[in-house]
Image: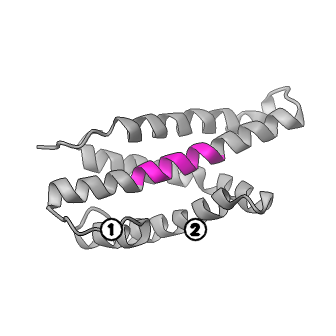
Amino acid sequence: MNKTDYKNLEKSLGELKEQYEIFLTLDEQDLSEVNKKAVKISVIKCFEICYDSLWKHIKRYLKEQDGLVELKNSPIPLFRNAHENLLLDKEMHKRLVQYNKIRNDAAQYCSIEKAMAALDKVEDFIHDATEIYETMTQEE
């Protein structure tokens, strides 16, 4: 029985998908450059929120489903635990570590180029986060 409440992850993933769909149509929209930049920043912020929600839900899942109690409160060691406990395969584990770097680069915002680089990986992240969500919730 799955006790974890996934509403926050579901909501953040839905918001990310919605904002990303708007981003994909930017070239077709008659928006100012300022508004286009605002949409891009919104997608990046939704990515950050969804990423944070994902790794925290993975932690809850490992505690409740696998009985792991001594888990680090940090994504990288947590992804390793998730891989060792067969929630993530090797390739998914590698991609999540890459998303961690992208998320940290985007969140620091010391470079607009680094933040905007996150846009290149959002579609892949949506796919992977959806797959993990479905595995944890046993939904399709």
User: How many marks do you count on the picture?
Assistant: 2
Name the residue located 60 percent from the left edge and 56 percent from the top edge: 121
Instruction: Please identify, in this view, whether the residue under mark 1 or under mark 2 is nearer the observer.
Output: 2
Look at the numbered disc 2 and give the secondary structure of its residue.
helix
**Can you tell which quarter of the image residue 33 is in?**
top right
Residue hosting label 2: 101
Q: Which residues are magenta?
A: 44-54
Amino acid marked by disc 2: Lys
- Residue 29 on image: x %, y %: 80, 27
How many neighbours does mark 1 have within 10 angstroms: few (below 14), some (14-19), or many (20 or more)?
Answer: few
Could you tell me which quadrant the C terminus lies in?
top left
Q: Residue furthest left?
A: 1
Could you tell me which quadrant the N terminus lies in?
top left
* Residue 104 forms part of the magenta stretch: no
Q: On residue 89, which mark appears?
A: 1
Look at the numbered disc 1 and give the secondary structure of its residue.
loop
